[in-house]
């Protein structure tokens, strides 16, 4: 997959099969669109193109809103789209100029003259152009003139609930990582460098790798304890993760930590990735480190029981 960091870097194609959007999470519904995009590109001898925006349009329109966090970092999103078989990914800033294009200007200047669109695939609620004024009607009325076809992908449901990035974010912010995984079709993950903590972990028999996530816009799930899988280089480990302020020791910062099972190495400075499989319990203020240690033993048992059940389930 070729990646372009600005629309201006893209060379117009003869037969671009295009879809446009933020695709945060690249959830089940997004995946339907992307798979159809690649299929249509193959069938018509064209090339699949995704135009996405970074930073998120809402961060440009409402820059004060620092609360809007993303399910994927831009690197994660590119990885998922690449794996789905996309040929070209254009990551363009959603500038004021861009957001001021009217629907007709947008169709002509962006879709036709810049990308070379011959087919466009859009989700059922796709809006575009200044103040989101453009929709199906505008796309259809220019289709003949510019010789492109349009295909609409319906809303996708999981257990009768329409999947959306907002629902995934809400599930993660409640700690419901299992539901988020159902919507996403993969396990939510956090990636970052292992940094030094207060070195209390090892004194109670549970060393924890403290993880620094560089992308400040990345969504961090709710405080709590989770069963996780840890990827370090090519090795995978089981573990239990903690997100919270460590009320027991009156911690001042919100930490992301993981105790990795069957592991005993110094890994400061290394990059690790954690996949969140199941929420185990909420954060608790214990009377002291002894009580915390007892609970950590229980957490480890619960985590191992979760993995055992997982290995016995048919799927
Ligand atoms: C599985 C797990 C569960 C945890 N649960 C709690 C908790 O309920 N309350 C709390 O104050 N700290 C909890 N912690 C965080 C510990 O307080 C923290 O790991 C310890 O203070 C070591 O910190 P350090 O990495 O800075 O040395 C938990 C940590 C892990 C790995
Ligand atoms: N099983 C393990 N899980 C996590 N980290 C481990 C493990 N074994 C050794 N380590 C190492 O120990 C460090 C954590 O020890 P800890 O006493 O909690 O210190 P810190 O407070 O600096 O995180 C990790 O960053 C890692 O380098």
Image (spheres, rainbow, N blue to C red):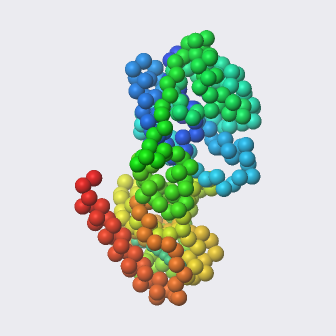
Left/right of residue 130 with respect to residue 300 in the rendered view: right
Expressed as whole percent of the image width and height from the top left, the position of residue 2 reads 51, 32
Q: Is the residue 162 above or below the residue 252 in the image?
A: above
Expressed as whole percent of the image width and height from the top left, the position of residue 236 reads 36, 59
Q: Is the residue 235 above or below the residue 291 in the image?
A: above
Expressed as whole percent of the image width and height from the top left, the position of residue 306 reads 33, 67
Q: Is residue 16 visible?
A: no
Expressed as whole percent of the image width and height from the top left, the position of residue 202 reads 46, 79
* Residue in view at x 49 percent, y 38 percent: 155
Q: Can residue 219 be seen in this view?
A: yes
Asked where in the image residue 264 lies, by quadrant, the reply is bottom left
Q: Is the residue 105 above or below the residue 153 in the image?
A: above
Q: Is the residue 169 above or below the residue 295 in the image?
A: above
* Residue in view at x 41 percent, y 51 percent: 182
Judging depth in this view, the residue of 167 and 23 nearest the camera is: 167
Left/right of residue 28 with respect to residue 197 in the rendered view: left
Left/right of residue 306 with respect to residue 72 in the rendered view: left
* Residue in view at x 58 percent, y 54 percent: 218
* Number of callouts: 0
Residue placed farthest to the top in the image? 145
Judging depth in this view, the residue of 82 and 155 nearest the camera is: 155
* Residue in view at x 39 percent, y 20 percent: 43
Residue placed farthest to the front in the image? 160
């Amino acid at each position: 997959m070729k990646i372009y960091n600005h629309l201006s870097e893209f060379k117009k194609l003869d037969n671009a099969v295009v879809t446009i959007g933020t695709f945060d999470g690249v959830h089940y519904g997004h995946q339907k669109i992307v798979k159809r995009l690649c299929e249509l590109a193959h069938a018509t001898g064209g090339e699949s193109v995704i135009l996405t925006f970074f930073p998120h349009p809402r961060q440009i329109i409402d820059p004060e809103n620092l609360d809007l966090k993303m399910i994927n970092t831009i690197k994660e999103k590119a990885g998922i789209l690449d794996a789905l078989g996309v040929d070209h990914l254009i990551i363009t800033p959603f500038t004021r100029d861009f957001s001021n294009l009217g629907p007709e200007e947008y169709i002509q200047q962006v879709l036709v003259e810049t990308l070379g669109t011959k087919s466009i695939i859009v989700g059922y609620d796709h809006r575009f152009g200044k103040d989101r004024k453009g929709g199906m009607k505008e796309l259809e009325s220019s289709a003949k003139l510019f010789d492109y076809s349009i295909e609409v992908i319906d809303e996708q449901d999981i257990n009768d609930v329409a999947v959306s990035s907002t629902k995934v974010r809400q599930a993660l912010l409640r700690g419901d990582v299992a539901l988020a995984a159902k919507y996403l079709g993969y396990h939510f993950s956090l990636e970052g460098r292992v940094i030094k903590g207060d070195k209390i972990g090892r004194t109670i028999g549970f060393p924890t790798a403290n993880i620094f996530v560089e992308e400040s816009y990345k969504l961090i799930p709710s405080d709590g304890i989770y069963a996780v899988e840890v990827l370090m280089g090519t090795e995978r480990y089981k573990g239990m993760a903690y997100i919270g302020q460590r009320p027991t020791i009156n911690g001042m910062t919100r930490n992301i930590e993981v105790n990795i099972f069957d592991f005993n190495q110094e890994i400061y400075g290394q990059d690790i990735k954690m996949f969140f499989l199941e929420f185990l319990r909420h954060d608790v203020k214990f009377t002291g480190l002894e009580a915390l240690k007892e609970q950590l033993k229980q957490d480890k048992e619960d985590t191992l029981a979760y993995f055992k059940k997982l290995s016995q389930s048919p799927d």
